[in-house]
Image (cartoon, rainbow, N blue to C red):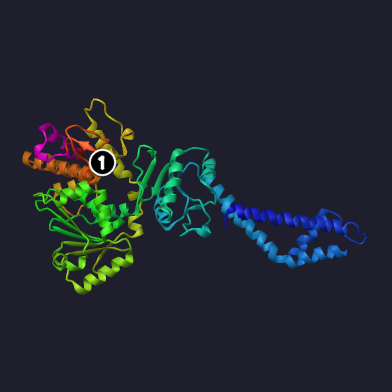
Amino acid sequence: MSAKKKTRILAAAVAAYLLVLLALVLAESGSPDSGIRSFGDALWYSVITLTTVGYGDLYPVTPAGKVLGTVLALCSVGVLSALIGLILSLLNGRFLPGLKIRRGRGKTWYVFPEASEDACTLAGELLQEENALCVFLQDKGSAAAILPEAVYYSADMGEVMRLRGGDREGIACFFMGKDEDSNYIAALEAAREGLTTYCMTDLHAGSQEAPKNLHVFSRSECISRSYWKEHPLRDEETDIVLIGCGAVGRALMERALLINVTGRTLPVSYHVFGRQEETEVFVRFHSAITADLTAGTPGEDRLALHTDGWMKERDLLEKAGRIIVCADTEAENLDVLAALRSWYAPQGALHVYCGAQIPGVTAFGGREAIVTKELVIRKALNQQAVKLHEIYSRGAAQPVPWEALSDFLQQSNIAAADHLAVKIRFLLGDGTLTEVTPALCERAYKVYCGLSEPDKERCREMEHRRWMRFHRLYNWAYAPVRDNARRRHPMLLPYRDLSREDQLKDSYAWEMLGEL
């Protein structure tokens, strides 16, 4: 029940109570034998009656007064308990939380309009920060989980901002309800009010009209980013099978194409199995990169989209270095896993999108692993992307600040920052490294500086391939003259066909390791 409805009920109950008292005074004041002659007398009598104390010092004597006294006696503890419950509920739902919020004005506020399971998981991590206050804009009773340190305040965003004093600094809003369309609409409105806003939705905000302070992310994006970070491609894996091409499967494949651009000599063959309508969506979204990777270019990775069912490909399943079971539902993935284990003999690793741990299988995608500050807010990654942009912009006649970049160019720099861990693994020769730390950057940079010129040339070519992958994934094409509106770029050529000046530009992505 909302606080407004509770307030209306309480107001109606108080009004009815006062009317009964007024009627009791009118009924009794005309009798010379009655002791109830004023509103104070009626109030005292009602309290003594409702609490069942019954001193007997005051009592009605008129027929109408006795009827009203009977009503008060019959209500007794039930009405009083209900009124006290409503009052306490209002105190806990509005007054006390509001007081706690006011006292926390100097803290960083994280506001969640809906206390969904995803929101509660993220809030639990955010509350570990010093000076953090998490506010859920609903009652505790309707929350998916209860966090003792959080504040549950049944109000709207406007009310919270009034308690904040209108100050928009140090406040971030997270729209993570189950209805993604509603999330986006509400987040867009909050962002236009100047609030830093994060929204869980598959919709992409990369348009000129979307505010720069609106940050969108999807569950499938978090899954894919977390997966390839924790389980990087190994050198011996040349055949990767993905069973599932829904939202999760597409995100995993997109991330793989962007991340798994390495200096390895053997190309990777990706085999994606999905329903025809699912694979058609992938091709429609990524027609350019699909055409590139199905053409059989020597030395380039391969992408094969299958619609005839994975069960027919026994030889492929049993030789694959890794099988990723990644349909959108856990039940379907468990069915696939059971069939694989029962009727096939896969020799490679089995990875399954499933929240529960399964013996002998690498499970991934659990809520605690994907709904994290690192994957939602991405502060460290964004800082690396900004640094990359600053380094690349040095010497430009008219450098463009990060805030003025288009969404596409910001995403391009974020993709480059995402690839830093791959570069570190390549330089240090350690495929187990997953973090980008200052110490690892320093070690990798020293190795890079000591490389021979042919090896540095190999690094530059690797970076150019990664850059081309990103643009081709978004369906850019070659043209002699750059045209952003039509997604055309003169550098979308094989590395060997670039001018020497353009080849050397790819050194920046490696040299920046020395500045992180």
Name the foreground residue: 171 vs 20.
Answer: 20
For residue 127, side relative to residue 436 (left or right): right
For residue 146, side relative to residue 299 (left or right): right
Q: Which residue appears at 26% of the width and 71% of the height? A: 338
Q: Which residue appears at 14% of the width and 44% of the height? A: 462
- Residue 345 to residue 279: above or below: below
- Residue 443 to residue 358: above or below: above
Q: Which residue appears at 66% of the width and 59% of the height? A: 84
For residue 6, side relative to residue 281 (left or right): right
Q: Which residue is mark 1?
A: 412
Residue 59 in sight: no
- The quadrant in which residue 48 appears is bottom right
Residue located farthest toward the bottom when viewing the structure as drawn: 342
Membership of 275 in magenta stretch: no
Residue 507 in sight: yes
Residue range of the region highlighted in magenta in the rendering: 492-510
Residue 6 screen position, x and y as percent: 62, 55
How many labels, in total? Answer: 1
Residue 433 screen position, x and y as percent: 20, 52
Residue 464 screen position, x and y as percent: 16, 41
Name the foreground residue: 132 vs 504.
Answer: 504
For numbered disc 1, what is the local secondary structure?
helix
- Residue 108 to residue 55: above or below: above
Dominant SS in magenta = helix
Amino acid carrying mark 1 in the image: Ser
User: In the rendered image, which quarter contains the C terminus?
Assistant: top left
